[in-house]
Amino acid sequence: MWTKARCLAALGRELPGAFTVEVAVKRPILLPSTVEYVEARDGDEIRFGVRDAERSTPHLDGLVSF
């Protein structure tokens, strides 16, 4: 849940007053670890995710719909 909240915080002011969020947790983030946040926009949707910085292993995938 913290990772989801952190991703939404990264989107910040770009989010409208009302939106829907869906996330899929793929793998746990083992500490210590280096991860990266990625996002892609397409019309009324933003796809986002958290990946392992070295291997690009997915940890979380999400979709924001307006």
Image: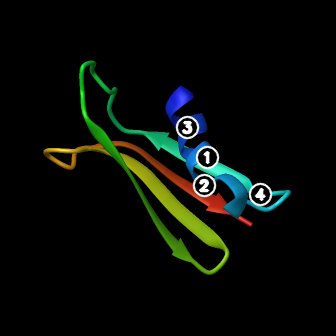
Q: Residues within 10 Å of mark 4 (few under 14, many from 20)?
A: few
Task: List the residue tagged with mark 1.
Answer: 8
Q: Amino acid at mark 4?
A: Phe
Quarter holding the C terminus is: bottom right
Task: List the residue tagged with mark 3.
Answer: 6
Which of the pair 9/22 is nearer the observer? 9
Quarter holding the N terminus is: top right
Mark drawn on residue 11 = 2
Disc 1 + disc 2, Cβ < 8 Å? yes
Looking at the image, residue 42 sits to the left or right of residue 32; the answer is right
Q: Amino acid at mark 3?
A: Arg
Disc 4 + disc 2, Cβ < 8 Å? no
Which of the two marks, 3 or 4, is nearer to us in this view?
3
Q: Earlier in the sequence, mark 4 or mark 1?
A: 1
**Of helix, strand and loop, which one carries label 1?**
helix
Identified at 84% across, 57% down, the residue is 18
Identified at 56% across, 49% down, the residue is 10
Q: Amino acid at mark 1?
A: Leu
Task: List the residue tagged with mark 4.
Answer: 19
Looking at the image, residue 32 sits to the left or right of residue 19; the answer is left
**Separation of residues labelled 4 and 1 (CA atoms):** 11 Å
**Separation of residues labelled 3 and 4 (CA atoms):** 16 Å
Q: Residues within 10 Å of mark 2 (few under 14, many from 20)?
A: few
